[in-house]
Amino acid sequence: MAANPPDTTTFEPSHTLTAADFHGSAGAIFELALDRATDGYVGIDHDELEMDLPDAPRCRTTWNAVRDSLSWVDDEHPGAWYHASLPDASAEFRDLWSLEDGDSGAFFLHTVVLTIDDEWLFFAVPHHSLCWLNAPDESFVDAVDDALAKHRACVLPEKTRVEWTGDGRNYSISGTSLCVEGGRLRTRGCYGLSNLETVRANEDERTLSLTWQPNPIPGAVGRALMSAMSLVYDPPERLQFEDEATFRDAESILREIIEKRDPTV
């Protein structure tokens, strides 16, 4: 795999990170993956080095320090792929990862892939707060769960865990999302479960009442974006079930996600 850049379009994750704090939680997983990986690939957006943003000088300094330890692999928009063997270049990859929480750094460090020989293990796109795993065994997932215990985060199996029909709509819980077919203004909407705050069950009516964070995108910019998105960001506040078993399954899964993500709740 070292001779070519990874084809991330073919990646099928076993688990996906859902987190209130992407930087801390993804960093904890990155460290675990780095200790196991045999090769590392990084997609660099060179244009970010020219940006007039507070962390751009740090990106330039870090890149100048690590560049000679990496081998160019291929050019690809918006920059280029580089490769290094691990653990020889682990320090350099840690230095690069330290940039991902910056305004320029999250885009400069466009993509990070860690592999074990020919199999990918860790895939992250920092500016999308995206982190996927291709877990080689349950021991790795257990180690990730332990590492995330200090963070408001968890990794969820990417497979569809439950699906049902209610109120004339099709619902499913898959990976880190609750998806609805037949939502307002569009035929399908998926809502990140990192924003789910509480679940309240009504056993007599066989319904689940959900509360969500008011602004899944933090800060003033988030408030402005959410105002513009209000017509399409419409997560369901009530789920109706036709049978007891599915009702119980969905309740259990949603509560498990909240408890794993925030054990203090």
Image: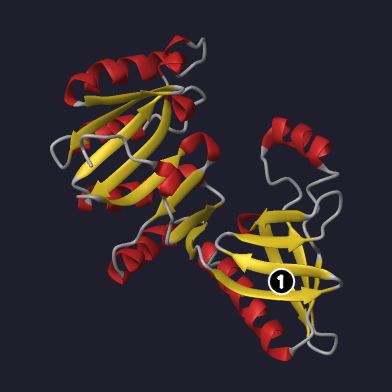
- Residue 129 shown left or right of residue 97 in the figure: right
Scheme of colours in the image: secondary structure
Q: How many marks?
A: 1
The residue at the point 41 percent across, 35 percent down is 111
User: Residue 124, position in %: x, y?
Assistant: 42, 43
- What kind of residue is marked 1? Val
Tell me: residue 106, above or below residue 7.
Answer: above
The residue at the point 76 percent across, 69 percent down is 170
Q: Nearer the viewer, residue 261 or 226?
A: 226
Secondary structure at numbered mark 1: strand
Tell me: residue 144, above or below residue 218.
Answer: below
Residue 86: image quadrant is: top left
User: Residue 203, position in %: x, y?
Assistant: 79, 88
The residue at the point 36 percent across, 50 percent down is 28
User: Residue 145, position in %: x, y?
Assistant: 39, 64
Write down the residue under mark 1.
199
Mark 1 nearby-residue class (10 Å; few <14, some 14–19, many ≥20): some
Whether residue 25 is visible to the viewer of this picture, yes or no, is no
Quadrant of the snapshot with the C terminus: bottom right
Tell me: residue 63, above or below residue 5.
Answer: above
